[in-house]
Image: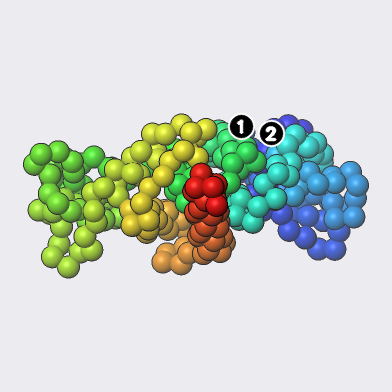
Amino acid sequence: MIEDLAIVLRSQAFKERDRLVTFLTEKHGKITGIAKGAIHSKRFGGTLDLFVCSAIHYKESQGSELVRIDEAHLRRDFLAIRERLENMSAAGYFTDLVLRLTQEKQAAREIFLLLSHYLYLLETAPATHEIVRSFEVKLLERLGYAPNFEECAACEAPLFGDNAGSFVSVAVERGGFLCSACSPAASRRVDPNSILWMILARETLIQHTPTLHFSQEHMAEGLNILQSFLRWHAPGIGEHEFRSHALLERFLEEARNQSMAAARSSATKEGLDSAGI
């Protein structure tokens, strides 16, 4: 019997009474298993729900990649995440990224810790574009897939500094960017400032990511860049978007607009009050 702490990445009905669950464990990486009778049994309760963290007990099965889940004990349900659409969507997107970018039964403790810390963050702070982008770039870094933000992927010239060019281009297949001198004539030009904010998102501590604020222009450009690298490293994704990503971006934009409208309304009210109106 193996015991490990696990975050549920995917949970679905299997046959009539069982549940097929994929989870990321702290010590043993991504595991997929069957919980017999879990659909109608009170024994598992909500321990196998999406992005719940549970202590699981499982056994390896002879001649099968699937394990048998015998017990699960709830450690944290992250229920507060479900109070906001954008937070629930962000949590679903994060687990989907981890599901697609990690390998079965390969140790991934750094990824487990990253995901758990961001799920905890989403319990206490509203999801924003900055928080989502920071998770993406930190995930790429911990997987060893992060692009080289500092040097040209061709000539190794610095991308920033007095002698750097006014633009760069994305070179996903080379694992980074090309300076203006090495960029093909037909390449899409990228403002180096969009790369600078990605470096800042990578370096900012997780608990401080809610304080990050970037311009819409650089945010949109960075989104496209990070998605290109994520899709490149996700088997079978190609040019397709990750599940729930488009919906998440819509929720984030709606939440941002509501927040800005509330701030403007508050500022207007304060102005009227100070004027005695």
Marks 1,2: beta carbons within 8 A: yes
What is the spatial separation of the Cα atoms under label 1 and label 2, in whole angstroms?
Answer: 8 Å
Mark 1 or 2, which is nearer the eye?
A: 2
Q: Give 94 or 102, whichever is nearer the viewer.
A: 94
- Residue 82 picture location, percent across and down: 70, 50
Residue 236 visible to an observer of this rendering: no
In the rendered structure, which amino acid carries the disc numbered 2? Leu
Residue 97 badge: none
- The residue drawn where x is 82% and y is 56% is 18
Query: Which numbered disc covers residue 5?
Result: 2
> Within 10 Å of the Cα at label 1, are there few (<14), some (14-19), or many (20+) other Cα atoms?
some
Q: Secondary structure at mark 2?
A: strand
Identify the residue at image location x=84%, y=51%.
Answer: 38
- The quadrant of the picture occupied by the N terminus is top right
**Residue 25 seen by the camera:** yes
Number of residues whose C-alpha sits closer than 10 Å to that of mark 2, classed few (under 14), some (14–19) or many (20 or more): many
Q: Earlier in the sequence, mark 1 or mark 2?
A: 2
**Residue occupying the point 90% across, 50% down:** 41
Q: Quadrant of residue 80?
A: top right
Q: Nearer the viewer, residue 112 or 251?
A: 251
Query: Residue 45 location in percent, x, y?
Result: 85, 46
> Label 1 amino acid?
Lys
The residue indicated by pointer 1 is 27
